[in-house]
Amino acid sequence: MPKIDRDQVKVPVDVPRDARETYIDNYMAATRGTGRLMLFACDQKVEHLNGDFYGEGIDPADLDPEHLFKIGSEGVCGVLAGQRGLIARYAADYPEVNYLVKMNSKTNLVKTAQDDPYSPQLHDLQAVLAMRDEGVNVVGLGYTLYLGSEYESTMLAEAGQLIAEAHEAGLVVVLWIYPRGKAVADEKAPALIAGAAGVALCLGADFVKVNPPKATDEATSAESLKIAATAAGRTGLVCAGGSTVDAQTFLTQLHDQIHIGGACGNATGRNIHQRSLDEAVRLTKAISAITLADYDVDRALKVFNGEEDFAL
């Protein structure tokens, strides 16, 4: 099982000396002491409205937002990512969960054909730090940036300033970066995914969440991902989980992303929370077994099927 010591955490120099120990605490908590990230993405209630939580193929339990927090508490995750208000409503009942506050969001109602995407920052950092002061276990922030949008410059400036302020407070930052807009012909083109990874590094992000690049005649998705992971340098690259697929397919893709593509983790939402509580918890354990403990797919499937347990 991969393990890192506190002195192995590469603390960025924009983290002040008096915040270094806090940053290391948060980094170790988010990565469960491995340097890898298992991010449980719970921000889709704004991004995709209720379509991701109720309907055909979705377990009825997912309609209740508390389902997300039960999974985060009973499963094995690095961080639970959600909007500030969502976390504020439930965190008191789930104080043991590591939270990553999503600082911006937009719905999917306005399509790119109508207007290029812009996801505005919903509040300032002080609103998050106030929750931390009240005992909420906030270890980091998240921000979505759409490269290629006509509003790109605004989002770049917001993200850059947010990362500087977050590091000053000892928080880690995960950027969601998706090339998207009328100027973008193919948002999953390998070169664009690698470019997004490099942008995250230059903005100072600790981790970047990208979509897996599309497969080409020359390379599989995981092989192209290796280019992006290298381009990200000391910013850890993780892949979005996408829509729900069967567990074996998902776990195989995840294993390839880490061991072929050089990813340092995953960021999964629908594939987890659209299942019953028991199944979702088992899937978090199977995902974490691969991400945090280098299990192979067959052994991770045993965890998912309840034949073997996984805990940290």
Image (cartoon, rainbow, N blue to C red):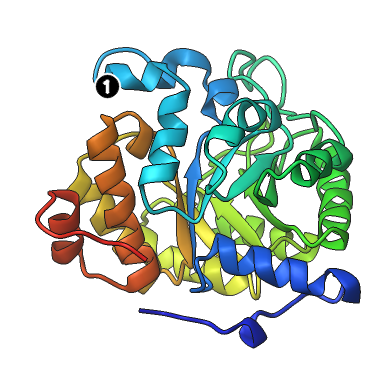
Q: Is residue 40 above or below residue 44?
A: below
Q: Amino acid at mark 1?
A: Asp
Considering the numbered disc 1 on the image, is that residue within a helix, a strand or a loop?
loop
Residue occupying image coordinates x 72% and y 26%: 116
Residue 149 coordinates in the image, percent (x, y): 74, 35
Task: Name which quarter of the figure residue 128 lies in.
Answer: top right
Q: Is residue 79 above or below residue 234?
A: above
Residue occupying image coordinates x 54% and y 69%: 229
Residue 151 coordinates in the image, percent (x, y): 81, 33
Q: Is residue 218 visible?
A: no
Question: Dot 1, crowdedness within 10 Å: few (<14), some or many (≥20)?
Answer: some
Residue 235 coordinates in the image, percent (x, y): 65, 68
Residue that label 1 marks: 59
Q: Is residue 22 above or below residue 86?
A: below
Q: Is residue 204 left or right of residue 211?
A: right
Residue 256 coordinates in the image, percent (x, y): 31, 65
**Which quadrant is home to the N terminus?**
bottom left
**Which quadrant is home to the C terminus?**
bottom left
Q: Nearer the viewer, residue 77 or 132?
A: 132
Q: Nearer the viewer, residue 149 or 49?
A: 49
Residue occupying image coordinates x 44% and y 64%: 224
Q: Is residue 135 left or right of residue 210?
A: right
Q: Is residue 219 left or right of residue 301?
A: right
Residue occupying image coordinates x 21% and y 69%: 296
Q: Is residue 308 left or right of residue 268?
A: left
Q: Nearer the viewer, residue 110 or 169?
A: 169
Q: Is residue 301 visible?
A: yes
Residue furthest to the left in view is 307
